Amino acid sequence: MKYEYLFDGTKISRFGFGLYKGENSNKGDTEMLKSIIYGLNKGINVIDTAQRYRNGRSEKIIKKVLNKFGKREKLIISSKVGLIPDYIKKNKILNKLKVQKSNCLLEHDFCIDPKFINWSVDNSLKLMNTRYIDFYLLHNPELSLKIRGGYKKIISALIELEIKRRQKKIINYGISTWNGFRRYSSNKNFLDIEKVVSDIEKQIGSDHGFKCIEAPVSIGMPDLLNYKPSTNFKFLDFLNKKKINFFSSASLYEGNLENLIELNKIFSSMNKKTDMLSENTKAKVSFPMSENSLRRLFILLENFKNNKLFIGDNKLNIRKFKNINSLGINSLKTLKFIKTSLIGMEKKKIVKTNFNDFNYVLNIKEIKYINKIWKKIKKNL
């Protein structure tokens, strides 16, 4: 297993478990537990979960992991608060906590109320049966920006997490954003990380616990590479200066890279004056839900087409990649700001297929080639 190092010197595996996938059942738990224990015994030491994942099951399964694997001090566990799971709605937890409605966006199942955050940390500790959580993150905090005074609510929520840190219930905290770094500054979802960290420093001082950012980045979602809250902003420099660890989420495009191959093939065929071969077979494609994400997907496909990047036909003259996931994994390794890449590995066979690619050491020629690919596909996003 290849490792990186967090800014506090902790060794972290190059990739880890993202527990958002898997069947929401006892069978799903059993499969996932086998997968996690297998990976941990192979040297993976990162498990990322959330209050929302699999309606709470993905936090509960940590207890089973710790009972079976032990060695809590060797693991890096992160969880999240903000997106509300069904079990919390069913048990009317928000009503019992008397949270302010002005701190919630219930149509998006989102709550950033300090009372809810305080309760959630304790609840996560209880469900996972652990004394502490390494990283506790605000889940999609950009949704708060749709609420009146939403930015201040984000800062207040982070201050609440600082309190939990000083109680030693969490080691550090941060944010897990989906759209915050993938939108233009004029968009309500846009999150200015420079301002967030600056305001935390003003409120708390330099000895704060804001030490983690989780956000999507992959060859299917390269938007973050264009993120610029200010003119001279460079993501790697910012993270190094502030000693903030970055975890990539949706590292393999949420398992949709195979579908991206099909989309790439169909979109690129528009340059040809021939029809596709398949007439009656359903195309193996998938599309994001939101208009903005669709727009960016179309731009990405246009970039593929204009640069003649046919990502599934093995013509990328680099390491004879077995498949698109292999290319996706090796592409991530050229992004120096990533400490670990989180991947949904709900089955043991998925863990096995990822090991060789994450452990492979790219040579200079391969790195240069992949960097050219990044430059081409992120254009105009």
Image (spheres, helix red, strand yellow):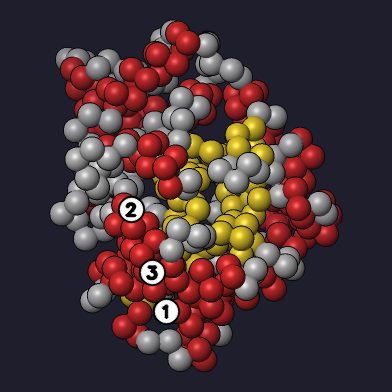
**Mark 2: secondary structure:** helix
Label 1 CA crowd tier, 10 Å (few <14, some 14–19, many 20+): many
Q: Is residue 220 left or right of residue 47?
A: left
Residue depicted at 33% across the width and 31% down the height: 263
Estimate the spatial distance between the alpha carbons at disc 3 and disc 2, rounded to whole Å: 15 Å
Which one is earlier in the sequence, the residue at label 1 or at label 2? 1
The crowd level at tag 3 (other Cα within 10 Å; few <14, some 14-19, many 20+) is few
Which amino acid does the dot numbered 3 rest on?
Gln
| Vertical order, 310 against 338 (above or below) | above
The amino acid pointed to by label 1 is: Asp
N-terminal of the pair, mark 3 or mark 1, is 1
- Residue at numbered disc 1: 113
According to the picture, the residue beneath numbered tag 3 turns out to be 203
The residue that appears at 31% across and 37% down in the rendered structure is 234
Residue 232 visible in the current orientation: yes
Query: Can the viewer see residue 325 in this picture?
Result: no
Relative horizontal placement of residue 328, taking residue 45 as reference (left or right): left
Give residue 193's mark: 2
Dividing the picture into quarters, in which one does residue 5 lie?
A: top right
Which three-letter amino acid code belongs to the residue tagged 2? Answer: Ile
Residue 260, how many percent across, how many down? 38, 32
